[in-house]
Amino acid sequence: MSSILSSLNDLAQSVVELVWSLFTTAGSLVQRTISFVLSFISGCANVVVDFFKGLVDLTGGVVQFFISNILILGAIAVAFFGFLQYQRQQGKQVKVGNTKLN
């Protein structure tokens, strides 16, 4: 008789564990689904932020390229103008091709 009661007790515990594992599995599934959705939204936001960050970096690089080229061309123009002024002060005619500049 005690073995029948022990068997029924084990059966009841198994059923309770089965129901408990179903609830914990469902809870874990809900938790992982919510975690996935939040990480997906966070990932999408990071993609947008990284895109605009890259766009700003690209724009800064292009602007820096143009400014550096303008500065180099300006330095060349100043050096050429200084050379022309030096030549004029020395009393020499400045020619570019067949055209006199002074």
Image: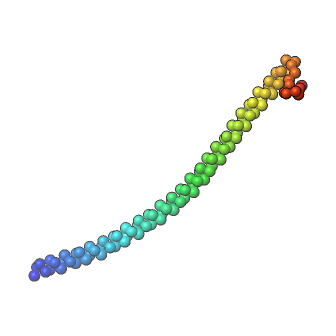
Q: Which residue of the protein is positioned furthest toward the top in this rendering? A: 90
Quarter in which the C terminus is drawn: top right
Q: Which residue of the protein is positioned furthest toward the bottom in this rendering? A: 1
Residue 33 location in percent, x, y? 43, 67
The front one of 53 and 92 is 92
**8 relative position to 40: left or right:** left
The front one of 16 and 33 is 33
In which quadrant of the rendered view does residue 23 lie? bottom left
Residue 71 location in percent, x, y? 72, 35
Q: Which residue of the protein is positioned furthest toward the left in this rendering? A: 1
Which residue is pictured at 25% across the width and 77% down the height?
15
**2 relative position to 68: left or right:** left
Which residue is pictured at 74% across the width and 31% down the height?
75
In which quadrant of the rendered view does residue 83 lie? top right
Residue 101 in sight in this render: no
Residue 20 location in percent, x, y? 30, 73
Residue 69 in sight in this render: yes
Which residue is pictured at 53% across the width and 60% down the height?
44
**30 relative position to 10: left or right:** right
Residue 42 location in percent, x, y? 51, 59
Count of numbered labels shown in the rendering: 0
**57 relative position to 32: left or right:** right
Up the image or down, 32 lies above or below 92; here it is below
| Coloring basis for residues | rainbow
Quarter in which the N terminus is drawn: bottom left
Q: Which residue of the protein is positioned furthest toward the front in this rendering? A: 98
The front one of 23 and 83 is 83
Which residue is pictured at 26% across the width and 73% down the height?
17
